[in-house]
Amino acid sequence: MGRRILIVEDDAFVADHLAALLEDNLDCSPIVAASVRDALAFVDVDFGFLDITVTDGQTFSVAQRLRERGVPFVFVSASDRSRIPAELAEAPFLRKPVAAPALLAAARQHL
């Protein structure tokens, strides 16, 4: 498959649904991580979908690492956007629940 997309999501149902959506509609290989620790091991990707709060904390360090590598990402979260630190405030944000077309559009915009 083509591009690698990191999905940081601790709800297995949501993660599986998003991975299947991406596989079915884009030439990509989704990589799912349920924790910040696991996600940091997979930052060599082409794009990222980051839930803000996962099992072991918040994904802001993952976002920073992706940014350092020049990898685009989108926060996808039910958390309030105001929780995002100022240095990441301009990052795209999709509020859960998100319709499939909006998720696909976000990925296509950056791939």
Image: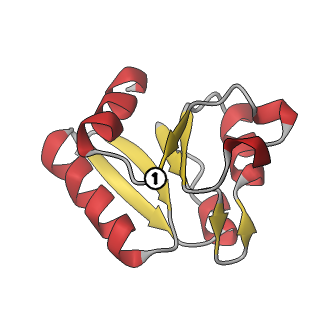
What residue is shown at x 43% (from left), y 24% (from top)?
110
Q: In this view, does 73 lie to the left or right of 107?
A: right
| Relative to 106, 63 lies left or right | right
Q: Nearer the viewer, residue 58 or 35?
A: 58
Residue 71 drawn at (x, y percent): 58, 32
User: Residue 68 is drawn in which quadrant?
Assistant: top right
Residue 60 position within the rendered picture, expressed as x and y whole percent measured from the top left: 75, 50
**Residue located at (36% from left, 67% from top):** 14
**Residue extending farthest right:** 86
Q: Where is residue 58 in the image (x, y as percent from the top left)?
A: 73, 62
- Name which residue lies at 66% across and 40% down: 66
Going by the image, does 19 lie left or right of 96? left
Quadrant containing the C terminus in the rendered view: top left
**Residue tagged 1:** 96
Residue 93 lies, in percent from the top left, at 56, 37
Is 12 situated above or below 88? Answer: below
Above or below 32: residue 81:
above
